[in-house]
Amino acid sequence: MSSYTISCTIGTTDSTAPLGLEIWLNDVRLFDTNHVVYDALPLTFGLDDNEDEHELRFVMTGKTQEHTKLDTAGNIIKDVSLTIKDLAFDEIKLGQVFIDRATYIHNFNGTKEETVDKFYGQMGCNGTVSLCFTTPIYLWLLECM
């Protein structure tokens, strides 16, 4: 059976404030750390080439109020976000396909109701970025373009 590779680079926007991250493919946890830091961390995972539906999830954890600095008027002057860059299937970067098809579910770190947002490459709140896709990957990529 042949397989595909899934790769990406993760990091944070501030080297002094680590965040947690889990990466799931369907119901299998591929990656789990409570210490994603500023330096970009490249990751690569395998995926079997079977005809099926899949969900790739990035789950950010560990963000607290201490990660966000406010001025006296309550405006954000510094914040820590988790970045997901260069998501690729078999070295084909998804780019805009990832932006168009991913959803970001979060509740503003417990301060508001749960919401579903678009994802633009950064996670600013604890929550889940989800990308649903099918295999064979190349057929799915053609359908997305």
Image (tube, rainbow, N blue to C red):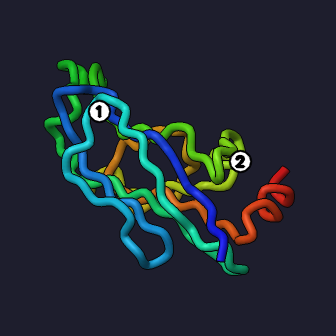
Front label number (1 vs 2)? 2
| Image x and y of residue 57, in percent | 47, 62
Give the image quarter of residue 40: top left
Compared to residue 120, the image places residue 116 above or below, namely below
The residue drawn where x is 78% and y is 63% is: 140
At x 23%, y 32%, the residue is: 68
Could you tell me the amino acid type at mark 2?
Val
Question: Amino acid type of disc 1?
Answer: Val
For residue 14, above or below residue 32: above
Q: Residue at x 26, y 54 (%)?
A: 61
Q: Is residue 71 left or right of residue 22?
A: left
Of the numbered discs in the image, which one, if any, rests on residue 10? none
Provide residue 75's location: percent of width, then percent of height. Answer: 30, 24
137 and 36: which one is in front?
137
Image-quadrant location for residue 28 = bottom left
- The residue to which callout 1 is attached is 80
- Whichever of callouts 1 and 2 sits on the residue coming sooner in the sequence is 1
* Crowding near the residue tagged with mark 1, few <14, some 14–19, many ≥20 C-alpha atoms within 10 Å: many
- Location of mark 2 (residue): 97
Q: Is residue 74 visible?
A: yes
Q: CA distance from mark 1 to mark 2?
A: 25 Å
Q: How many C-alpha atoms fall within 10 Å of the one at disc 2: few (<14), some, or many (≥20)?
A: some
SS state under label 2: helix
Q: Is the residue 101 above or below the residue 122 in the image?
A: below
Rendered residue at 31%/29% (across/down): 39
Q: Is residue 95 above or below residue 116?
A: above
Residue 111 visible, this orientation: no
